[in-house]
Amino acid sequence: MTLQARLAGLDWQRLGTVATLGVGFAFALAQAVGITPFAADAGAYWAARPGVLYTGWEMRPDGSLAYLYSPAFADAMIPLRLLPVMIFTALWQFALFLVMALVARGWSFLFVLAALPSITFHVLEPLNLVMRDIWSGNINVLLGGIAVAGLRRPYLWAIPLLSKVTPGVGIVWFLARREWSRLGIALTTTAVLALVSFIYLPSDWFDWVAFLRESSTYQFPQWVVPIPLVVRLAMSAVLIWWGARTDRPWVVPVAVGWAIPMPYPTLLAAVAFAIPVWFDTRHTRRGRPVAPGA
């Protein structure tokens, strides 16, 4: 058998997935022992304590980043706070690699490789945004993964709805396609988790509502996206509606990323998941049955 035939016979999707997990393990190990910079966003999730969650938009009194998500998200972290903070942030980073590997499969390793030119030569910076998001421990990669997997597993939409909220616009897909059972699962899961959290500590929910009201007067940096959130959210809803009616699931990661409240460039970490979905959709239309989020 020739070398070309052997290469053609390799399962590149599986190899890419395994390679991504290998890089993720090394990445997490480096974080755990303090070789890589501290994952500040993941550290904010670890530092958030029920009862004193909302203390400002910039920094908390202990020097950690501000916590901005719902009390339900913070309550879910309670068991994980038994871990030392560096172990928590390491596991969090590995979990993001795992999401990327499971959802994007072989493409996930291309996202990893795309960061190398930026790191080494400071070129192609936009391609580094997926890895940069994992580096900080934010959840944009997770949101991108849910934008794909959530079309088949609607209960996953509880995560964006109870964290950054507006990326939950993805459930418009079910509304547009009249998939009422899946829409009901997404909303019911969210409501049940929110209710459990509310029963646990109602005051946190009242504080969160007041905190969100303050956002109307807080001047968020617009960065490279000088478009108000309400406009971007409407654009995302329209895009998803169009995609749902025309069977284009790749629009969901794009719309979810576009709807992220603070328009940091790393929102492209969620948008990047549109790439494998777009290729899968093309193959499906050529006769290969690849389901979105499979």
Image (tube, grey):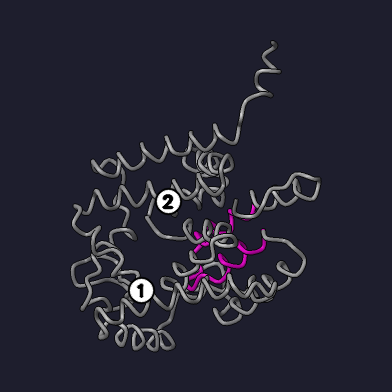
The CA distance from mark 2 to mark 1 is 19 Å
Specify whether residue 258 is painted magenta.
yes
Q: Which residue is at 74% across, 63% downward? A: 247
Q: Amino acid at mark 2?
A: Leu
Q: Residue furthest top?
A: 1
Snapshot quadrant of residue 214: bottom left
Left or right for 157, reference 35: right
Q: Residue furthest right?
A: 286
Q: Quadrant of residue 28?
A: top left
Residue nearest the viewer, comparing 44 with 152:
152
Highlighted range, magenta? 250-275
Q: Amino acid at mark 1?
A: Leu
* Residue under numbered circle 1: 68
Residue at the (37%, 55%) spot, across then down: 137
Q: Nearer the viewer, residue 132 or 186?
A: 186
Q: Does residue 202 sit above or below 58 in this rendering?
A: below
Choose top left, top right, bottom left or bottom right for residue 169. bottom right
Q: Disc 2 marks which residue?
A: 96
